[in-house]
Image (cartoon, rainbow, N blue to C red):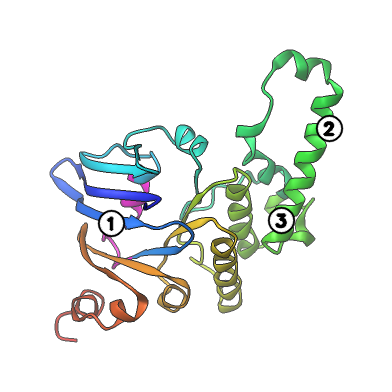
Amino acid sequence: MALLEVRELSKAFGGVMAVQEVSFEVEPGIVYSVIGPNGAGKTTLFNLITGIYTPSSGEIRLDGQPIAGQAPHRLAQKGMARTFQNLQICMNMTARENVMVGAHLGLDRNLLKGMLRWPALRRADMALREKAAELMAYVGLEAFVDSRADAMPYGALKRLEVARALAAQPRILFLDEPAAGLNPKETSEIDVLVKKIADGGVTVVLVEHDMKMVMNISDRILVLDYGKKLTEGTAREVRRNPDVIAAYLGKAA
């Protein structure tokens, strides 16, 4: 059974249809990419699935259970995490603290325990700090563990967001343009990281404009154009599709 199912999903903003009757499925453990020209509806689709927006119509199912319209924190509890196109980093915190924020679902929120600083709580805090350091090493940021976020380079901050999302222990991870603004070396590092995450058993759904990266790492690709599903298939099938070529390069091409 597919991990994620989207059926006839639509979203209207006033009289503008940003997403129109889009359907697709994502199998567990793969890299599934969503591409399309600017304004195609890619980020809107992400926002619908991850609870930022409520659909105008259609269905979204995770593990066969309906999730459309559920709040992001509820979806996180069900195993969904995401990053954003624009950095959502707490710049006045250390890198490690930013990653620890991602694990908030597993924290003990008992106020009395917190006031008394029970030994169990202190041990849990230490374990969380160690886990955050492990995740930073996993994404290649071990040199920045106790650095302030505002002192880190942009490329490192993009990977820090991924580490924070992984701290929630998701089963499905949505990455919104993780290579945006990166140089070729940094993009290559993200490329390797995404494949590493999927190989580790976490399903990755990706929005990205870097076509070389998309074609290199994707198991399946969904192409959107003006909010509609243009086509879906493997990288080989998509790159040879004349409708995709026309959408990106113009009808004359």
**Structural crowding at the residue carrying mark 3, measured as other residues with C-alpha within 10 Å and reported as few (<14), some (14–19) or many (≥20):** many
Q: Mark 3 points at which residue?
A: 136
Residue ID at (71%, 50%): 95
Q: Is residue 92 visible?
A: no
Question: Which comes before the other along the chain, label 1 or label 3?
Answer: 1
Q: Can residue 95 be seen in this view?
A: yes
Looking at the picture, which amino acid does disc 2 mark? Arg
Q: Which mark is residue 24?
A: 1
Question: Which comes before the other along the chain, label 1 or label 2?
Answer: 1
- Give the number of marks: 3
Residue ID at (38%, 39%): 52
- Give the x, y percent position of residue 235: 36, 77
Residue ID at (75%, 40%): 128
Residue 48 sits above or below residue 118 on the image? below
Callout 2: SS? helix
Residue 132 sits above or below residue 208 on the image? above
Give the residues drawn in magenta, as a range: 35-48
